[in-house]
Image (cartoon, helix red, strand yellow):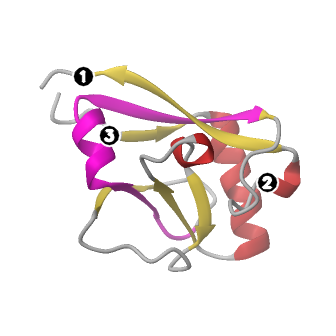
Amino acid sequence: MADTPRVELTPAAADLVRQLRQAHGPLMFHQSGGCCDGSAPMCYPDGEFRTGDSDVLLASLTVPGVAEPVPFWMSKTQFEVWSHTRLIVDVVAGRGSGFSLEAPEGVRFLIRSRLVGG
């Protein structure tokens, strides 16, 4: 289980990341533990969302066609709840939060998860 990635992207999510990278430059994700849109991964220009001691860097995602890794952060409290899951970032139709870069595209990122051994 040590080589099981903590976070991965579906092909559709990777395509959207490539489009957003082209339009906005280097990107980052942050997954909070909040309600409503806080339960969806938010995509920002890298560094726009300030992370700190209350956040955990889960992964630096390698996306073919994107020059630099895309960091995926999660709040520590959310990580405690999801520590035995592999997160799969997907894309679905519908409007998410106005703060996430994909919102104007008519789609939103969504987390799917699978249990992994602990």
Query: Could you tell me which secondary element the residue under label 3 belongs to?
Result: loop
Query: Could you tell me which secondary element the residue under label 2 belongs to?
Result: helix
Q: Nearer the viewer, residue 39 or 92?
A: 39
Measure the alpha-carbon separation of dots 1 and 3.
9 Å
Q: Position of residue 34 (x, y in %)?
A: 48, 47
- Seen as rendered, the residue at the extreme front is 35
Q: Which image quadrant is residue 45 in?
A: bottom right
Name the residue: 57% across, 43% down: 40
In the image, is 67 to the left or to the right of 18? Answer: left
Q: Earlier in the sequence, mark 2 or mark 3?
A: 3
Q: Amino acid at mark 3?
A: Arg
**Numbered label attached to residue 116:** 1
Residue where numbered disc 2 is placed: 103
Image quarter of the N terminus: top left
Q: Is residue 59 visible?
A: no
Magenta segment: 67-92
> Dot 3 surroundings within 10 Å: few (below 14), some, or many (20 or more)?
many
Measure the alpha-carbon separation of dots 2 and 1.
30 Å
